[in-house]
Image (cartoon, rainbow, N blue to C red):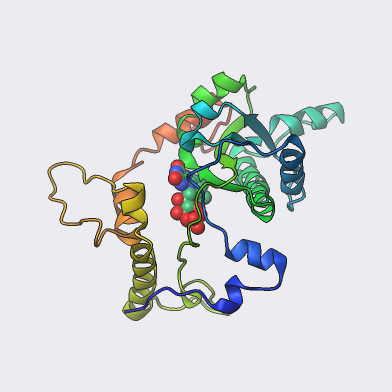
Amino acid sequence: MYVFTYKKSDIMSENHVIHTMLNHKSVRKYKNEPPTQEEIEQIVRAGQQAPFVSQLYSVLLSRNREKHPFKAPLMFTICVDIQKMEKIMDKKGWKMVTNDLSLLLFGIQDAAYMAQNMVTAGESMGIGSVFLGRAIYIAESIKKEYQLPDRVFPLVQLAMGYPDEDEPPRPRYPLDFVLFENKYPELTDDLIDKAVSMMDEGYLQQDYYRKLNAKIKLSGDKEDRFTYDDYSWTEHISRKWGQWYDSIETPLKQLETCGFHIVTDEED
Ligand SMILES: Cc1cc2nc3c(=O)[nH]c(=O)nc-3n(C[C@H](O)[C@H](O)[C@H](O)COP(=O)(O)O)c2cc1C
């Protein structure tokens, strides 16, 4: 059995940036007091300083705590925004010819790096956050709520505020399941078992799913033999990808609603 432990040298790193990053944990319990306007602006500025393809993003902010998941004081919605670029190009006498799939793939990177910079910036100031993946499935209602123009797609939401909990960092795969030098190795049973063990034992040690009451139900009449004593990350994540989101139509429809046309030339 491989038990997830933290190298003291990691967690105690004297490098402030590494220390902040290795101590990252999503926060799901927040104090009432919101971050100040100055803190918010610093976080978004730090987000903006992420490397970019073309700054293909916009960030929406809501302070309506009662409506936010986990009653977080702030909720950002990070959008892929192609409109801005097209408006700038228009002024310069250019027309966008790049296909929407490429724009989306690049835009997702711009928005994601910026969003993660915001997470790290916040954490360096004692402000916690958690991403919320629902945006891509409720894009239509977000579009209505924030009156988004076409060519703006809400990619991910980020709830944020001062933490009212102090959980340990969650486990990650062992490095030899992630970093492959020169050649992608054969994923042997040993490598896979080690990765599974490290993740599952780590989450069980923290009683993570029991505390969140986050067991995913089995569909149909399948018998669930797992309890919170043995339900852990690999079971959770297998239930998610093994049961949800099988239709491509739903995300395509959300994209279409936001003015992104993801089809092959033959279908066009
Ligand atoms: C794109 C994305 C979507 C996520 N969506 C949710 C969500 O809807 N609800 C939630 O509680 N956590 C969500 N998370 C947070 C992950 O569950 C969390 O990052 C992961 O379990 C690792 O834990 P850690 O961030 O504490 O290290 C999301 C994370 C990402 C990157």
Task: Locate the N terminus and report the quarter of the image it occupies.
Answer: bottom left
Viewer-closest of 41 and 181 = 41
Image coords of residue 196 (percent x, y): 35, 69
Image coords of residue 42 (percent x, y): 76, 44
- At 15% from the left and 56% from the top, the residue drawn is 225
Q: Is residue 99 left or right of residue 192?
A: right
Q: Is residue 219 visible?
A: yes
Q: Is residue 145 left or right of residue 253?
A: right
- Within the image, what quadrant is residue 155 found in? top right
Tally of marks: 0
Q: Is residue 94 left or right of residue 12?
A: right
Image coords of residue 2 (percent x, y): 36, 78
16 relative to 176, above or below: above
- View extreme (right): residue: 92
187 relative to 113, above or below: below
Viewer-closest of 46 and 220 = 46
Q: Is residue 241 visible?
A: no
- At 33% from the left and 75% from the top, the residue drawn is 193
65 relative to 147, above or below: below
Image coords of residue 64 (percent x, y): 57, 26
Viewer-closest of 56 and 169 = 169
- At 36% from the left and 76% from the top, the residue drawn is 194
